[in-house]
Image (cartoon, grey):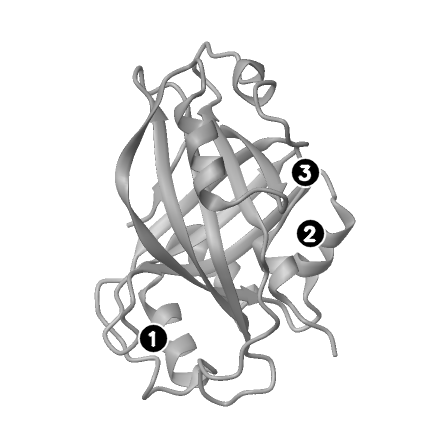
Amino acid sequence: MSTVKSWRYEYKMVIDNMTLDEIKTKVLLHPESFIERYPARKVNNIYFDTNDLSNYHDALSGTNYRSKLRFRWYGEEASKIMGCMELKEKKGMLISKITQDIGYAFDLNALSWKEIVEKIGSSLADLLKVEFQYACVPVIINSYCRYYYETLDEQCRITLDCNQKAYDQRIYFKPNLCFRNPDSEHIILEIKSDFNKDFNVNRITNYFPFRVYRNSKYASGIYWI
């Protein structure tokens, strides 16, 4: 069964002139009193798209409504991964997700893309199943280390993403985890707050000396030779 999460605000800042430790300190010194809520962990995604990369082109053009379809899991494991499919929809600064757990582990090192797509597709239901039938071409696998912060009243969350890596899948019969695209040195700061909560996100964004910037890890992870 899929889970629909409510709409939330999401603001992204792309940082390339400060170290990770400097940015962490900046977050912890914020007047809204952020604390580190969870241990840092590695986030991994397989991004799927249509044959003509319609989701990628929507992200590049910055259309008001766009979506991304991905399989996400956490940690270093690649041989027995368990995760969930996510349909991420974006309208301006508002984000919503539909998620569904995939209730079995599979091995990226042993299976072909055809087998992986068939296994995932057979386990999906409702809108995710429809979307996956339309956009089931594996395009990239990416990963990054994510740090989690939250205000004491749990009204606002900040994540920091660093050590981004991306692996192109478009010409491979099996998952490519060896040949990496050029790495991104950027650190991504994301500010997230639920849409239905009475919270002024500008109090958070105005403190940071960084510009809010449209950024897609999926689009930026694709490397054109």
The Cα–Cα distance between marks 2 and 3, rounded to whole angstroms, is 13 Å
Which label's residue is closer to the chain start, 2 or 3? 2
Q: Residue at x 50, y 31 (%)?
A: 191
Helix, strand or loop at disc 2? helix
Taking 13 as reference, is 157 above or below it? above
The percent position of residue 76, horizontal first and vertical second, equals 29, 67
Q: Nearer the viewer, residue 80 or 63?
A: 80
Residue 157, image x, y percentages = 40, 29
CA–CA distance in space, label 2 to label 1: 27 Å
Residue type, numbered disc 1? Lys
Q: Is residue 123 above or below residue 119?
A: above
User: Taking 89 as reference, is 106 above or below it?
Assistant: below
In whole angstroms, how far apart are the C-alphas of marks 1 and 3? 36 Å
- First in sequence, mark 2 or 1: give its number: 2
Residue 141 bears which disc, if any? Answer: none
Mark 2 touching mark 1, by CB under 8 A? Answer: no
Residue at horizontal 64 percent and vertical 46 percent from the top: 215
Asked whether residue 138 is in view, the answer is: no
- Circle 1 crowding by C-alpha within 10 Å: few under 14, some 14–19, many from 20: some
Between circles 1 and 3, the one closer to the viewer is 3
Write down the residue under mark 1: 119
Of marks 2 and 3, the one in the foreground: 3
- Up-down: is 208 above or below 145? above
Q: How many marks?
A: 3
Front in this rendered view, residue 7 or 26: 26
Mark 3 lies on a secondary structure that is loop
Q: Which residue is mark 2?
A: 59
Tell me the residue that label 3 is attached to: 213
Say which amino acid is labelled 2. Answer: Ala
